[in-house]
Image: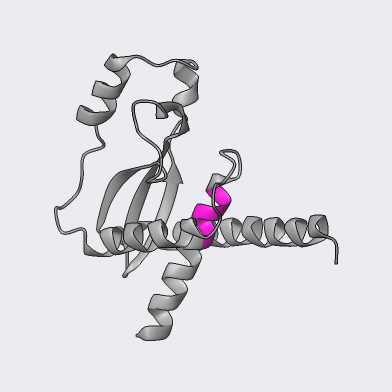
Amino acid sequence: MHIATVLKYFMNFRIELALKADKEYNQNAHKVTGYDEYLYLPKSLKVEANINKLQHFLTLSYDNKVYNIMMPSIKKYGSNPDKLLLKYLQFNRVSKISTAQNTITKFWDYFEEFILQYKGVNSENFIYYLKEAEWRFNFELRVKN
């Protein structure tokens, strides 16, 4: 098989996972018990020099599962955000329902390990990798229970 065929197959798979996650969340939105936001940047990059590469998403938890929503891209502020924007990201955060975020922090740890295998993800496709990690996390949790 050609590499382009394989990449297309997996991208279609990730898109289907994202649609399935949306459908499942919409059926369970009333069960949300907590949420928190996450700023992801590969550990090899420094925040100050790579602020435009931050991926910002909101993680919601329900029934020991998670659902992720991408927040607006930092790129809308231009290609050279200043220190004021860094301060904004540090101090202006989405408020939380509760401080007990066990499922969410477990997902974030899982996601950090999961995303390493791809050695860089295009920002336009990041949501699909996030949704794949979400699906795997939720599925593995169900299999273990």
Residue 92 position (above or below residue 39): above
- Left or right placement of residue 87 versus residue 127 in this view: left
Tell me where residue 118 appears, x and y as whole percent.
Answer: 56, 56
Colouring of the image: one colour
What secondary structure is the magenta-colored segment mainly? Answer: helix
Where are the magenta residues, as a range?
127-132
Tell me where residue 103 appears, x and y as whole percent.
Answer: 27, 64
Residue 53 position (above or below residue 27): above
Tell me where residue 129 appears, x and y as whole percent.
Answer: 55, 54
Residue 108 position (above or below residue 54): below
Q: Quadrant of the C terminus?
A: bottom left
Residue 94 position (above or below residue 144): above
| Residue 28 part of the magenta segment | no
Q: Nearer the viewer, residue 2 or 108?
A: 2
Q: Nearer the viewer, residue 57 or 28?
A: 57
- Left or right placement of residue 24 versus residue 113 in this view: right
